[in-house]
Amino acid sequence: MPAQPIHPPHRLLMGPGPITADPRVLRAMSAALVGQYDPAMTAYMAETQQLYREVFRTGNDATLLVDGTSRAGIEAALVSLITPGDRVLVPVFGRFGHLLREIAERCGAEVHVIEREWGEVFPPDEVIAALDRVRPKLLALVHGDTSTTVAQPLADIGAACRERDVLFYTDVTASLGGNVFEADAWGVDAATAGLQKCLAGPSGSSPITLSPRAVEVIRARTSIEAGLREADSPVSAHPIRSNYFDLGQILEYWGPKRLNHHTEATSMLYAARECARLLVEEGMDAAVARHELHGAAMAAGLEGLGLRLFGDQQHRMNNVIGVFIPAGVDGEAVRGGLLTDYAIEIGTSFGPLHGRIWRIGVMGYNARRDAVLTTLAALEQVLRQAGVPVPHGGGVAAAQARYAVAA
Ligand SMILES: Cc1ncc(COP(=O)(O)O)c(C=O)c1O
């Protein structure tokens, strides 16, 4: 039988990402392609840069997109900032800290790790003490670790890095747009994100911002590839160890020279631009407040169903809620019931939390009252079917009560 046209089932994606994309973003992606040096395209690129400066809250000129999923942005930042042999400090409090460690090791760094149990964050003093002990060139620290649902406080860490001449990289894939993030005010040198969480888009583009300090480090290693090189082009003895993720060359591509590198993923650029445009139109503070409200309503609703929340609630991300699977319940069967009968997806978990918690995302396009209430109503039914004595209407009532307080 010949392959049929793509016709995915309807789903409400309430997991830790990807989430249901905003239809306006999907519409932007279907716009006609233009050539990569078409004035329309270069204007869209410049607009995208300006929009992401607002999203990251930065004046950094070097604010652009890395093509690929969020991990592409992480790799680009780390491979471009780390010269083999550099000392790097990675505080790990979940899966994505382990990812930073792994990528930094592959970049040839001497990696030093400090660890916290999943569900906790580091008191900032602990990170600062480790900076003094390790004296790294780079601190690589996740902001919101989706695997554990908590967000590391970053506000004081950037200043400590500046005082010690340490570069500060952070992964804000899960947190950006739904939680306060201030690249400049917090002294962040490099931050990378993705579209598929609070930015309400599909995965496949990684916004990045780089401080002048970070750009200086990268420029010192920039090597323009043979075939494009001119007499005055830089050629480094220690070039960045990836061509595709060479931020030196990518900066030249996005900069006034428009030096050819990859072919920009046009439809993803349209998506990324629309994601940022929608956030800026809403207002960053309003977007964060929306995530806080709907995340709090979901958390209240889960407790209203008699479930116990996971992790340090003082530091929970606004947009992802971890909840313990009740004793004796098959977590995967409940997820399956939600998907089959209600077309709702919630998340499983990794590593030490596997089989212990579900993760429920309330973010981007789905940070909405109807999405929260529908999920709670469906979860109540599936839990009851699984033999859990859930209070009738307890989830929806508790969420509604939370909304009433905010009204
Ligand atoms: C905090 C964080 N960092 C990195 C990633 C990797 O993102 P991607 O799968 O888009 O490469 C994720 C994905 O969930 C994430 O939550």
Image: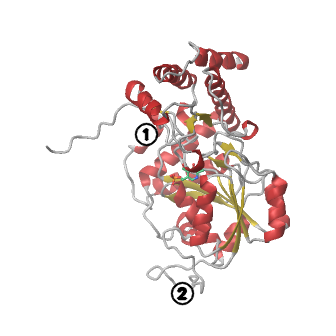
Above or below residue 109? Residue 154 is: above
| Rendering quarter of residue 6 | top left
The kind of secondary structure element at disc 2 is loop
Q: Which mark is residue 210?
A: none
The span from disc 2 to disc 1 (Cα, nearest Å) is 44 Å
| Rendering quarter of residue 342 | top left
Q: Quadrant of the N terminus?
A: top left
Asked whether the viewer can see residue 41, the reply is yes
- Residue under the point 54% across and 48% down: 350
Q: Position of residue 322 (x, y in %)?
A: 61, 37
Above or below residue 394? Residue 174 is: below
Relative to 381, 222 lies left or right: right
Which residue type does callout 2 highlight?
Ala
Q: Residues within 10 Å of mark 1 (few under 14, many from 20)?
A: some
Q: Quadrant of the C terminus?
A: top right
Which mark is first along the chain, 1 or 2? 1
Residue farthest toward the top in the current orientation of the protein: 392
Q: Which mark is residue 26?
A: 1
Above or below residue 372? Residue 221 is: below
Q: Position of residue 187 (x, y in %)?
A: 77, 57
Q: Which mark is residue 231?
A: 2
Q: Position of residue 405 (x, y in %)?
A: 73, 17
Viewer-side residue, 391 vs 153: 391
Above or below residue 244? Residue 351 is: above
